[in-house]
Image (cartoon, rainbow, N blue to C red):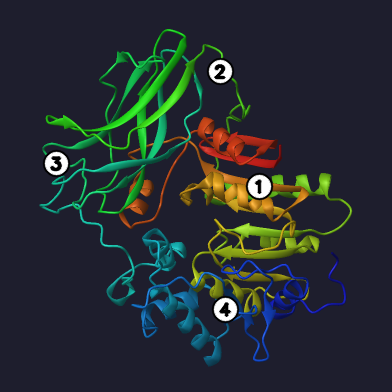
């Protein structure tokens, strides 16, 4: 995989991957080809857009995006923040990328992510810097809780729990009704549960109450952090989640039931003792990166690797691995940030050793051939995915048999009152926070096991391999 003697521009790298048949059409799942005019397609399939050197393999935007959104203030702020050379053609390229923050995706949570450029770069928002694509999530609607219909979608609560403990575990719900559902009314909607025996007899009916963290629009989804008190007596039980409108009634419908064993010595699938260390954001990411480098030096000492980073944005952490002659593909749902990332590495951070390409796509269905990558890296991003077990399982498909998946700097101390957690949810971003035990269940369902890891404060860092 040594790239010696090759050009290290994004175009040559994309062309190389296409020539090897490693990039697939997301619609037809066949290898892309390069058309005569330099675009990417496959026979009978759509043409895929390339702009500012980045490739858009998502393309699932609504017709409402007319492509004419302009924000001079944000463009100038981004241009300065990324320290681009002051050339008209680069400023125009940045303006084209910023315009794409107005794209409205099929999934509202993706639209919120795409519109997040200013906050990702730590830039203030004012005036025209307010993104038009952010979902309108109201907490003042007078129509709240008029029709409460809730479906449970998933939970990663483990099947064996300790007795007599107050735990925090999450359930994901969907609003199937026609009105906003809220926990901020006189008769709030909360998520509760019942404990039953294996015959369905009630052991405890009124479980602890857990509020929705934000008001939930019709059709909207949210992952609710729930308080759960486990039975004191060991044995086999059924844990049944059910919504309740306080002071009124339990909400019937699609309830969620899990078979649970209460055992004083539950198995530990992720045996990581807390390190006693707690780092700030930058230090935490540096620690995670050093773990990856050590692992690669131990396991891949025979040469450079091809690395995929998921949710890399403009500054993927794996870019540091290019110093080890690694090829890096960074994917993100935001085509704007993919473009800005490519522009940054072309005009600010470029040197002859750099070999990085940016692709926008839905990482739940990574558009790559089987066994394309030696390693896959996810920094502080797994908790944004609605189906993390499916994400990781599909990422395994594009990983070589001896490859690794590094899940770094994941928040693992669920806190319903965390300000940043609530801020992101209020903007429509799919923010979640699972416990270490829930992460262990996610990894197990994805067919992965622990190779190495550590727990620093509320930051989980693990390197995973196939089971």
Specify the quadrant that holds the N terminus.
Answer: bottom right
Secondary structure beneath disc 2? loop
Q: Nearer the viewer, mark 3 or mark 4?
A: 4
Foreground pick, 342 / 247: 247
State the CA–CA distance, disc 2 to disc 4: 49 Å
State the CA–CA distance, disc 2 to disc 1: 26 Å
State the CA–CA distance, disc 1 to disc 4: 29 Å
Residue drawn where x is 34% and y is 69% of the image = 133
Q: Which residue is mark 1?
A: 406
Q: Nearer the viewer, mark 2 or mark 1?
A: 2
- How far from the left and from the top, in percent, is residue 443? 60, 38
Q: Earlier in the sequence, mark 2 or mark 4?
A: 4
State the CA–CA distance, disc 3 to disc 4: 47 Å
Q: Earlier in the sequence, mark 1 or mark 4?
A: 4
Q: Which residue is mark 4?
A: 48
Residue drawn where x is 43% and y is 27% of the image = 258
Q: Which residue is mark 2?
A: 266
Secondary structure beneath disc 4? loop
The reply to whether discs 1 and 4 touch (Cβ–Cβ < 8 Å) is no
The reply to whether discs 3 and 4 touch (Cβ–Cβ < 8 Å) is no
Q: Which residue is mark 3?
A: 185
- How far from the left and from the top, in percent, is residue 116? 41, 64
Q: Nearer the viewer, mark 2 or mark 4?
A: 4
């Amino acid at each position: 995989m040594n790239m010696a003697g090759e050009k290290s521009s994004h175009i040559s790298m994309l062309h190389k991957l296409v020539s090897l048949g490693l990039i697939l059409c997301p619609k037809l799942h066949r290898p892309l080809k390069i058309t005569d005019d330099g675009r990417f397609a496959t026979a009978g399939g759509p043409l895929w857009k390339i702009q500012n050197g980045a490739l858009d393999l998502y393309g699932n935007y609504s017709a409402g995006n007319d492509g004419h959104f302009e924000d001079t203030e944000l463009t100038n702020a981004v241009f300065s923040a990324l320290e681009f050379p002051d050339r008209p053609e680069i400023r125009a390229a940045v303006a084209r990328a910023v315009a794409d923050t107005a794209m409205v995706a099929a999934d509202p949570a993706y639209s919120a992510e795409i519109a997040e450029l200013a906050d990702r770069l730590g830039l203030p928002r004012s005036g025209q810097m307010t993104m038009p694509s952010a979902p309108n999530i109201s907490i003042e609607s007078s129509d709240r809780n008029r029709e409460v219909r809730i479906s449970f979608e998933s939970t990663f609560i483990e099947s064996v729990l300790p007795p007599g403990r107050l735990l925090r575990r999450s359930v994901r719900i969907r609003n199937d009704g026609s009105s906003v559902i809220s926990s901020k009314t006189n008769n709030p909607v909360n998520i509760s549960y019942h404990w039953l025996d294996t015959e369905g007899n009630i052991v405890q009916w009124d479980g602890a109450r857990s509020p929705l963290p934000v008001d939930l629009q019709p059709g909207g989804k949210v992952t609710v952090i729930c308080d759960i008190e486990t039975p004191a007596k060991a044995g086999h039980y059924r844990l049944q989640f059910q919504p309740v409108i306080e002071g009124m009634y339990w909400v019937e419908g699609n309830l969620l039931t899990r078979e649970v064993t209460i055992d004083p010595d539950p198995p530990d699938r992720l045996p990581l003792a807390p390190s006693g260390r707690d780092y700030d954001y930058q230090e935490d990411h540096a620690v995670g990166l050093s773990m990856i480098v050590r692992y690669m030096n131990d396991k891949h000492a025979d040469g450079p690797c091809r690395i995929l980073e998921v949710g890399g944005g403009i500054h993927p952490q794996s870019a540091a691995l290019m110093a080890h002659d690694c090829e890096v593909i960074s994917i993100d749902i935001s085509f704007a940030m993919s473009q800005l990332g490519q522009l940054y590495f072309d005009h600010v951070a470029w040197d002859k050793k750099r070999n990085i390409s940016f692709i926008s796509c839905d990482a739940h269905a990574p558009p790559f051939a089987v066994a394309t990558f030696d390693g896959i890296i996810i920094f502080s991003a797994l908790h944004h995915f609605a189906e993390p077990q499916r994400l990781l399982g599909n990422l395994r498909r594009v990983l070589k048999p001896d490859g690794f998946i590094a899940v770094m700097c994941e928040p693992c101390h669920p806190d319903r009152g965390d300000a940043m957690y609530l801020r992101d949810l209020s903007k429509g971003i799919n923010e979640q926070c699972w416990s270490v035990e829930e992460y262990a269940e996610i990894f197990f369902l994805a067919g992965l096991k622990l190779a190495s890891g550590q727990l620093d404060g509320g930051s989980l860092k693990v390197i995973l391999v196939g089971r």
